[in-house]
Image: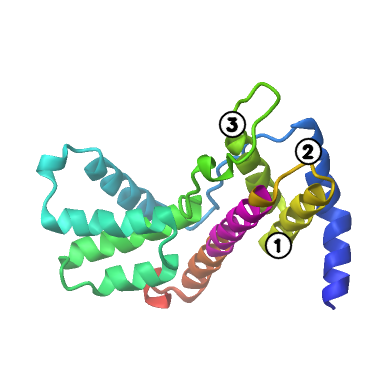
Amino acid sequence: MRTDLIRRTVRRWAGACLAAAAFGSLSAAPARFPAVAPDARAELARAVGHFGAIAARPPATVTAETAIALGYLERLRLGLGSPFRLVDQARQDPRLAPATRHGVAWALLGHTLAGDSYEIDPAALDSERDSVGAARGAWHLRLIDRTVTAAGDPREGELAVRLGYSLGRGERSVSGALVAASAQAAALLRDRELARHDAVRLLDAARVSGVDPLLLV
């Protein structure tokens, strides 16, 4: 079973990953926001927009409650915890007013759907430089992101990245440090995509059953 998965993944993705690495042909994956029911879409947009505007305010105007609310969104951005666990925690946080709990939970769900989570600093992949000495971290991150995102199953995309960079290490075209960093980046992007897929299923289940999506988390 495991062997079949590896063979299928190698045929489908590893070749493309290595070819892209050779020719530098990949660009950043386009942002995706899946189609959802109109009422849910409005709720998501309202919550994301509201807290986005609050985050842009001068720090001196931020209240204690607002700081707590924005803290949840920052934890999501950095991948510090499961998005759905954060949603559940925000819904029950006694430090927040009921309306704020509701808004934060929807904003977390909206950012999860948009892929605004598990953010990776390209500098983490800057262990190697090109022929003129320029850092290559951003390029490697785009390559890894596109490979994981384009896969039908993000876990296959992650495996393709691991295989591709491991093969590159065997050919001495990449360093061991980059192999390790690329594996960590692929794992984070896998988690981001799996969370996005789960959010789509959550909203679909809520639409079919006619219940508040937050109650299904």
**Does 206 sit left or right of 163 as displayed?**
left
Was residue 191 drawn as part of the magenta stretch in this picture? yes
**Residue found at x 69% / y 51%:** 176
**Disc 3 to disc 1, how far (Cα)?**
30 Å
Density class for disc 1 (Cα within 10 Å; few <14, some 14-19, many ≥20) is some
Segment tinted magenta in the rendering: 178-195
Q: Earlier in the sequence, mark 1 or mark 2?
A: 2
- Find numbered disc 2 in the image and state the secondary structure of the residue it sits on: helix
Based on the displayed image, in which of its 4 quarters is residue 210 positioned? bottom left
Query: Looking at numbered disc 2 in the image, what kind of residue is underneath it?
Result: Ala
Q: Nearer the viewer, mark 1 or mark 2?
A: 2
Q: Earlier in the sequence, mark 3 or mark 1?
A: 3
Q: Position of residue 148 (x, y in %)?
A: 67, 53
- Find numbered disc 1 in the image and state the secondary structure of the residue it sits on: loop
Query: Looking at numbered disc 3 in the image, what kind of residue is underneath it?
Result: Ala
**Residue found at x 34% / y 53%:** 74
For the N terminus, the image quarter is bottom right
**Disc 1 to disc 2, how far (Cα)?**
19 Å
Numbered label attached to residue 153: 1
Question: Which of 92/205 is in front?
Answer: 92
Density class for disc 2 (Cα within 10 Å; few <14, some 14-19, many ≥20) is some
Question: Which of 183/88 is in front?
Answer: 183
Numbered label attached to residue 20: 2
